[in-house]
Amino acid sequence: MQRVNKFLNSIFANPIVTKEIKQRTRSMKFALTLAGWLLLITVFSFIFLKNFAKEFVEVEIYKTNAIGFQTFLIILLTAFFGMLMVILTSQAIAKERENQTLDILLSTTMSNFEIVIGKMIAAAGEVIILFFATFPVYALLYLYGLMKFQDILGMFVYIFVLILFYGSLGLLMSTVLKKSIGATVVVIVVVVVIVLISYISVVALSDVISTLPSQPPRKADLIKLLLTSLSPLFALVEYIFTQIGRSDLFFTYSYKVKGYQVHFLLCLIGTFINIALSSYFLNPLRRGFFRKDTRAKGV
């Protein structure tokens, strides 16, 4: 019970969260980031409404344009917030080390887990503020009948979990590596490599499957499921098409479990693992996640 209370206090009563969110949200950099992002989203939405959201003789033309616009908008949102989260978390610990303030932070009464979770929540808090600021623009998807309102909320939750995973990966790299730039580059390279390998695998396997008519359908379905489960881009696209009722536009397979569901679960588990590893590597004596007293005695 004591560990549970300590865990809850590290989240809801963390001084790092209060301090860093106040500093970030009061800066001119945050205001410019918010204004620039909203301007970008508004411009793209205006272009769509100006050029595509007109009266069409054929409804299918409107649906095709609307689906394309929606997919582009959601991928843009995920890429922007994912990049922002990675940059913020990859600088969390490495920046303290570069400024030579990490030893001071470690000498406080806070445990290594409280430090890590505080940095993570502070970065996520800034992203959440931008999320809520973007929500009115994305309500256009509901206004033009592209998605139901509850589906938009579900989409935000799904994207946020994906972003948290890659943010926690950036936090882990920030703890392990000495430079914040190196940590950011490593995470971005990992994501790009995963997407490229998935795309190349799809192209190569599609050619192989098409040339082998005797290929077992079950095996082909398993390959599609695995590729979607491991690729952040494929999982996101499949999720979008599923929400708008056009899952036939993407990979079709016989499994009831979808690739985006598996990817969501992997990201959720991976986030906890990355935070735990970050807490472990932050501790100079490697003696656990909550053992601040033991570490102090050893010092």
Image (tube, rainbow, N blue to C red):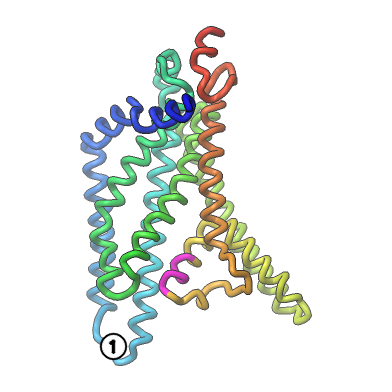
Residue shown at the point (55%, 44%) measured from the top left:
270
Crowd tier of the residue under label 1, counting other residues whose Cα lies within 10 Å: few below 14, some 14–19, many 20 or above: few
Task: Give the quadrant of residue 100.
Answer: top left
Residue at the bottom extreme, as displayed: 57
Residue 2 vs residue 220: left or right? Answer: left
Image-quadrant location for residue 140: bottom left
Residue 104 in view in this figure: yes
In this figure, which residue is indicated by the disc labeled 1?
56
Q: Position of residue 220 (x, y in %)?
A: 69, 71
- As displayed, is residue 60 above or below residue 50? below
Magenta residues span 239-244
Name the magenta segment's main secondary structure.
Answer: helix
Residue 195 visible from this viewpoint: no
* Pick the front one: 17 or 85: 17
Q: Which residue is drawn at 37% across and 38% down?
A: 123
Residue 85 at what x, y percent from top left?
A: 40, 43
In the current view of this chain or complex, which residue is farthest to the right? 214
- Indicate whether 183 appears above or below 282: below
Q: Is mark 1 on a helix, strand or loop?
A: loop
Quadrant assignment, res 126 = top left
Disc 1 marks a residue whose amino acid type is: Phe
Asked whether 117 or 80 is in front, the reply is: 117
Q: In this view, does 135 lie above or below 5?
A: below
Query: Residue 254, how many percent across, how many down?
Result: 63, 74
Residue under the point 78% across and 80% down: 214
